[in-house]
Image (cartoon, rainbow, N blue to C red):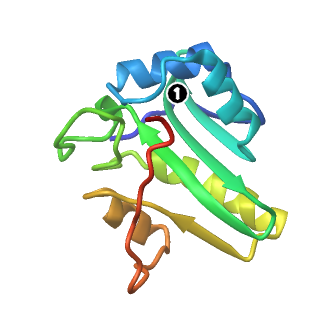
Amino acid sequence: MTYDDITYETMSKADPGELHDFYERQQHPTTGSREKLKRMMDNTYCFVAARRNGQIIGIARGVTDGLWGRLAECKLDPAYQGPACVTKTDGRIEHDEAGIARRMAQMVIDALRTYGVERIDALAYGTEVDFCEELGFKKMRGLVPLELKATV
């Protein structure tokens, strides 16, 4: 399936309200605080939005400290992922039939490379691993993901 009316927009900042609405539609568990979303965007190096009829249907975001970069997130509305999409929640990339998520992720990766980072990392879950491997990411041996909740 192809969509000829998808537009891609690279911006330095996304509107926190619009971003919040996108996350809500995807049932993505994130903060409800627009101030925290604004702060997240302030610390984002590259933000790409895919739009259809003016509405965000996908996002990709990259962060960097100048040396290392990270594909921080790539989310696509499951309605645009094709029939193999399983969970249909959280915007997780499960089947990028139209190549929308791939294009957004590649735009972020290209921006990080142009900036001169020496390494780009990504965290992936489930079917997102295949998506990242198709972009050229390799599994890192011996690493164990760890998490620390900042709030008590």
Q: Amino acid at mark 1?
A: Asp
Q: Nearer the viewer, residue 139 or 103?
A: 139
Quarter of the view holding residue 12: top right
Q: Say which residue appears at 34% left-offset and 64% top-offset.
A: 129
Residue 105: x, y in percent?
A: 55, 53
Counting every numbered tag in the picture gives: 1
Quarter of the view holding residue 11: top right
In this view, which residue lies farthest toward the front?
152
Q: Nearer the viewer, residue 70 or 94?
A: 70
Q: Say which residue appears at 68% left-offset and 63% top-offset.
A: 69
Q: Residues within 10 Å of mark 1 (few under 14, many from 20)?
A: few
Q: Can residue 54 be spotted in the picture?
A: no
Quarter of the image that includes the C terminus: top left
Residue 89: x, y in percent?
A: 26, 32
Disc 1: which residue? 5
Q: Say which residue appears at 52% left-offset and 27% top-offset.
A: 5
Q: Can residue 142 be spotted in the picture?
A: yes
Q: Is residue 58 above or below residue 136?
A: above
Quarter of the image that includes the N terminus: top left
Residue 112: x, y in percent?
A: 73, 61
Q: Nearer the viewer, residue 29 or 92?
A: 29
Residue 86: x, y in percent?
A: 16, 43
Q: Say which residue appears at 77% left-offset and 60% top-offset.
A: 65
Q: Nearer the viewer, residue 41 or 76?
A: 41
For label 1, the SS is loop
Quarter of the view holding residue 33: top right
